[in-house]
């Protein structure tokens, strides 16, 4: 329980540089899901929760919302992996391919 309370205290502290924190997290996800075990877990998540229909026929609306919540977490992981692969943090690329840092 002590670890949870430590996490909870730091959870609400904003990092000084949000772009750097986002980039670090994306690269950590890329590292974790880039391993054979990580790819296996991601494949299972995609198969069992992401590439499925969220609607539960005859079910309660909260059942569908629960399924959509699961999909949203997996979608965030996929977006994080894509950002890490592209490596474009806080920088825009114009039509000519030139990068401009903001």
Image: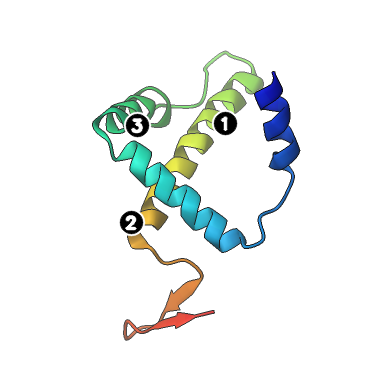
Report which residue position mark 3 lands on.
42
* Label 1 or label 3, whichever comes before in sequence order: 3
* Quarter holding residue 42: top left
View extreme (top): residue: 58
Task: Classify 99 as above or below 14.
Answer: below
* Label 1 or label 2, whichever comes before in sequence order: 1
Task: Classify 8 as above or below 97.
Answer: above
Q: Residues within 10 Å of mark 3 (few under 14, many from 20)?
A: some
Name the secondary structure under disc 3: helix
Locate residue 43 relative to residue 74 in the image: left or right.
left
Which residue is at 35% across, 61% downward? Answer: 86
- Residue 41, percent from left and from top: 34, 26
- Contact check, label 3 and label 2, Cβ < 8 Å: no
Which residue is at 49% across, 48% downward? Answer: 25
Report which residue position mark 1 lands on.
69
In this view, the mark in front (1 or 3): 3
Residue at mark 1 to residue at mark 3: CA–CA distance: 16 Å
Q: Residues within 10 Å of mark 2 (few under 14, many from 20)?
A: few
* Label 3 or label 2, whichever comes before in sequence order: 3
Report which residue position mark 2 lands on.
85
Task: Classify 11 as above or below 53.
Answer: below
Locate residue 25 relative to residue 51 in the image: left or right.
right
Name the secondary structure under disc 1: helix
State the quadrant of the C terminus: bottom right
Residue at mark 3 to residue at mark 2: CA–CA distance: 16 Å
- Contact check, label 1 and label 2, Cβ < 8 Å: no
- Residue 6, percent from left and from top: 70, 32
Name the secondary structure under disc 2: helix
């Amino acid at each position: 329980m002590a670890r949870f309370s430590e996490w909870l205290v730091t959870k609400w502290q904003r990092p000084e540089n949000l772009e750097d924190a986002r980039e670090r997290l994306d690269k950590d996800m890329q590292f974790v899901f880039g391993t054979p075990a990580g790819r296996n877990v991601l494949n299972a998540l995609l198969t069992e929760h992401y590439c499925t229909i969220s609607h539960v026929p005859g079910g309660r609306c909260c059942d569908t919302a629960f399924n959509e919540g699961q999909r949203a977490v997996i979608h965030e992981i996929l977006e994080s992996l894509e950002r890490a692969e592209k490596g474009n943090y806080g920088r825009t690329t114009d039509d000519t391919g030139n990068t401009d840092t903001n």
